[in-house]
Amino acid sequence: MQASDFKQLFLPCHRKLFSVAYRLMGNVQAAEDLVQETFLKLWIQRDKMGTVDHPEAYSITVLRRLFYDKMRTGRLQEVDKDVGTLQVSSSQNISRQLEQADEYQRVRQMIVSLPEPQASIMLMRDVEDRSYEEISIETGLTEVNIRSILSRARKKIREQIKTMRYDKD
């Protein structure tokens, strides 16, 4: 694949890749790093891949796999939101806001620790708000199968949250 072909296929996907990366990482700089790493991996693999029918879905899959690889190897540190986004108005209860942020991070970690394909399907559907059709195209699973996997994943997360709240009281 020539550089011009690569640019035509994958550079228009940058905005969507950044959006997905930001949802996964929760930090602008870390998300941009992940997007750049994705483009690098795509560039290195350009001669090995044949024709790509859905470059956006393919590049998002590569991005997600890089993210999961980093999570598994422990090289990725949990990052908090940028300091600028944590401005609190005087009327808000700061302890409640911190508690919600902590619960969000725990639930996010629970989702990431689910077995595959439950983790990736739950992230695609519930975090990225992707349609069942898009998930089906990317994973190669039927929509019925995706709904079933998603139902089991949500049930596991609900059970873990109940256990977490029970242990808290």
Image (cartoon, helix red, strand yellow):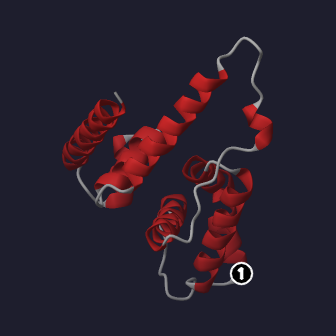
Residue 13 or residue 116, whichever sits in front: 116
Residue 61 visible, this angle = yes
Other-residue count near label 1 (Cα within 10 Å), few / some / many at <14 / 14–19 / ≥20 = few
Screen quadrant of the N terminus: bottom right
Q: Quadrant of residue 81?
A: top right
Expressed as whole percent of the image width and height from the top left, the position of residue 128 reads 49, 43
SS at mark 1 in the image? helix
Residue at point 74%, 57% (across, down)? 29
Residue 134 visible, this angle = no
Residue at point 61%, 56% (across, down)? 17
Expressed as whole percent of the image width and height from the top left, the position of residue 85 reads 75, 35
The residue that mark 1 highlights is 3
Give the amino acid type for the residue marked by disc 1 in the picture. Answer: Ala
Q: How many marks?
A: 1
Residue 154 or residue 8, whichever sits in front: 154
**Left or right position of 48 against 37:** left
Screen quadrant of the C terminus: top left
Expressed as whole percent of the image width and height from the top left, the position of residue 90 reads 77, 15
Residue at point 44%, 50% (across, down)? 109
